[in-house]
Amino acid sequence: MAWSGGGRGRRGRRWALALAAGLGLALVAPAPGRAVEPGLKHSMTPASLGLTAEAVSFPAADSVAVAGWWLPGPEKSPVVVVAARGTGTMADMLPAAREFLARGFTVLTFEYRGFGPAASAEAVDSLRHVLLNTQWVGEMLGALRYARARGGAHVFAWGQDLGSAVALAAAARERASCDAVAVEGLFRTTQEAMLANGTSVLHDLQVRHRRLVDGRDEPFSAANRLRCPLFVVLAGKDVVTPVAETRTVVGRVRGRADTWELPEAGHAGAEATPGYFDRLAKWFRQWTAFPPGGGR
C-alpha cells in the first residue's frame, strides 16, 4: 500500500523504518501477492442454493451502510453471524450458512468494505497489504447489533481465517452484542501473519500509521478482553496459522475457552471434517440456556 504526498510519504517511510529498527523488526521484501483477496462478483446466490434470503442493510460502528443477507431459520431461532474469509465475497460463505440453517439457526452474512459487487477495482487494490481492517470489525459489530435488534434471542459469531479475527475483535468490543463466538484459523497478530504470508513488516507499519488497524482489535489483545465463551478449532496441518500460535491467543482468554483439535485439517478447511457443523451447533446451543448478553 503506497503512501502519497511526496515529502510526506518519504517522511512516513523513514518513520516506519525507524520504528521497525527500534522494535527490532526485520523487514522483508514485499510479496507480489496480497494479504487478502477481495472478490468483486458473487460466485453464487442464496437462490442458486435453494435458500430463502432477504437483502438487508445496517449501519457499521462508524455508521457506514453494510450490505448483507438475512437467511431466516425457525421462528425465534438463535442467529449465527458469519464473518467471511479474506478471499472472495460473502457469497462464498453460503454453503456454511446452509449447514447452520439445516441445524435450526438463522444466519446473517455481510460484505466487508472493499469486497463484493459494490466495490471498485481501486478499492480492492487499496487492500493489497491489509490483513485486518478495523472497519471490518466495525461492520461485524454492526451485524451483531442488527441481529440482536431484529429479535435474535441469542446471537453467535463464527469466522474462519480473516473472519476469525474479525469475529473475535467484534465480540470483545461489546459484550452485550454476542453470546458466544467460534473461530478457525486464528492468527495472533497481523505482523506475524503478514510475515508468514510473505508480506513486509514495513507495509504492516504503514497500515498501522494510517490507522486502518486498531491495536485493540489484534487477536492477541482482543482475547484478553473477551467476556463471552470462545470455541477454537485447531487445524493440525494449518501452516498459515499454526496450532502453537493460536494456542497463545486462547491462553489470553480469561473466561470459558474450548478447543477442538483436528490433526488432519488444513487452514480454513476443517469444515470438511465429518460432524464439523454438528459440533459447532451443539456448542452454540448450550449457551441458549443462559440469558442473552449475560456473563458466564
Image (cartoon, grey):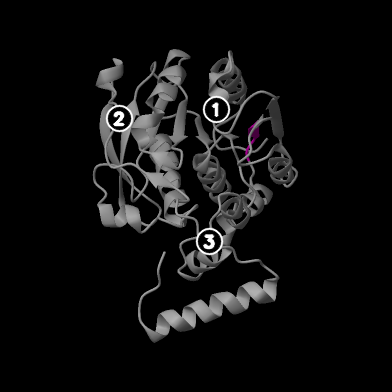
The tag on residue 269 is 1
Looking at the rendered structure, the kind of residue marked 3 is Asp
Quadrant in which residue 106 is drawn: top left
The answer to which of 54 and 87 lies nearer the viewer is 87
Residue 162 location, x and y as percent?
50, 43
In-image side of 16 versus 104 (left or right) = right
Q: Magenta stretch containing residue 83, yes or no?
A: no
Residue 202 location, x and y as percent?
54, 67
User: How would you classify the magenta stretch by its main secondary structure?
Assistant: strand
| Residue 63 appears in view | no
Residue 160 location, x and y as percent?
52, 35
The answer to which of 148 and 241 lies nearer the viewer is 241
N-term mark: 3 or 2: 2
Which residue does the image show at 63% across and 72% down from the upper left? 20
The tag on residue 43 is 2
Distance from Cα at disc 1 to Cα at disc 2: 18 Å
* Residue with the most extreme bottom position: 7
Classify mark 2: residues with Cα within 10 Å, few (<14), some (14-19) or many (20+).
Answer: few
Q: What is the magenta range? A: 228-233
Which residue does the image show at 40% across and 72% down from the upper left? 3
Tell me the mark number nearer the camera, choosing from 3 and 2.
Answer: 2
N-term mark: 1 or 2: 2
Classify mark 1: residues with Cα within 10 Å, few (<14), some (14-19) or many (20+).
Answer: some
**Judging from the image, what secondary structure is the residue with disc 1 in?**
loop
Circle 3 residue: 214
Which residue does the image show at 65% across and 35% down from the upper left? 229
Q: Magenta stretch containing residue 231, yes or no?
A: yes
N-term mark: 1 or 3: 3
Looking at the rendered structure, the kind of residue marked 2 is Ser
Quadrant in which residue 151 is drawn: top left
**Judging from the image, what secondary structure is the residue with disc 2 in?**
loop
